[in-house]
Amino acid sequence: MTQPDLSEYLTSLQSKRAEIGDENRIRGTIAIESTADAMDQTQGAQERDLAIGAFDRNAKVLRDLQSALGRIQAGTFGMCLDCECDIGKRRLAAIPWASSCIVCQEEADRRAGEPLRMTEQSFDRAA
């Protein structure tokens, strides 16, 4: 990867990190308020759930951003952590913090979507 490419990705990662901002900013919307009205309580619970979901997503992206910035410093940015092949430029343009090539990511997504299967050995241990 060329130095201008790395500089562009570094700028993009830093920009995204600034966009997400400090994760503490979201915590204020998670506060629980007591209300006598059932509709207000329901709405408040839904808003809290949305805020918690946003907090979780942002925290994960921030971790991924920090990891990508660390890979730039280590000289391994753009290399798949699973198979050590180059991550495609189109993938990095879309998701600069990507740590896996598209093939490895699709495999990981497929495995994550599969239900856990009990093998005979694990069944024997469970019994």
Image (cartoon, helix red, strand yellow):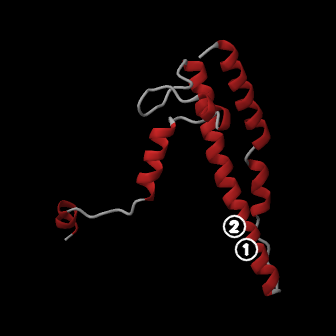
Residue under the point 50% across and 25% down: 86
Q: How many marks?
A: 2
- Residue 45, numbered circle: 1
Residue at the spot of label 2:
49
> To which quarter of the image does residue 67 belong?
top right
**Residue 34 picture quarter:** bottom right
Element assignment for label 2 = helix
Residue type at mark 1: give it: Ala
Q: What residue type is labelled 2?
A: Asp
Residue 87, numbered circle: none
Circle 2 residues within 10 Å: few <14, some 14–19, many ≥20: some
Estimate the x, y position of residue 92 in percent, counting from the top left: 62, 32
The answer, for residue 84, to whether it is visible in the render is: yes
Q: Tell me where residue 10 appears, x and y as whole percent.
A: 70, 24
Q: Where is residue 32 in the image (x, y as percent from the top left)?
A: 75, 70
The residue at the point 73 percent across, 30 percent down is: 12
Q: Which of 75 and 49 is in front in this view?
A: 75
The quarter of the rendered structure image containing the N terminus is: top right
Is 85 placed above or below 26 here?
above
Q: Position of residue 2 (x, y in %)?
A: 63, 14
Q: Quarter of the image containing the C terminus? A: bottom left
Is residue 21 visible to the viewer in this orientation of the structure? no
In the image, 10 versus 95, the foreground residue is 95
Which residue sits at x=77%, y=80%?
41
Q: Residue at x 67, y 19 (%)?
A: 5
Give the answer, above or below, for where 10 lies relative to 57.
above
- Describe residue 55's horizontal placement relative to residue 21 as left or right: left
Observer-nearest residue: 102 or 127? 102
Q: Give the CA separation, mark 2 to mark 1.
A: 6 Å
Looking at the image, do the residues carrying marks 2 and 1 touch, with CB atoms under 8 Å apart? yes
Q: Assign a secondary structure to mark 1.
A: helix
Above or below for 106 versus 113? above
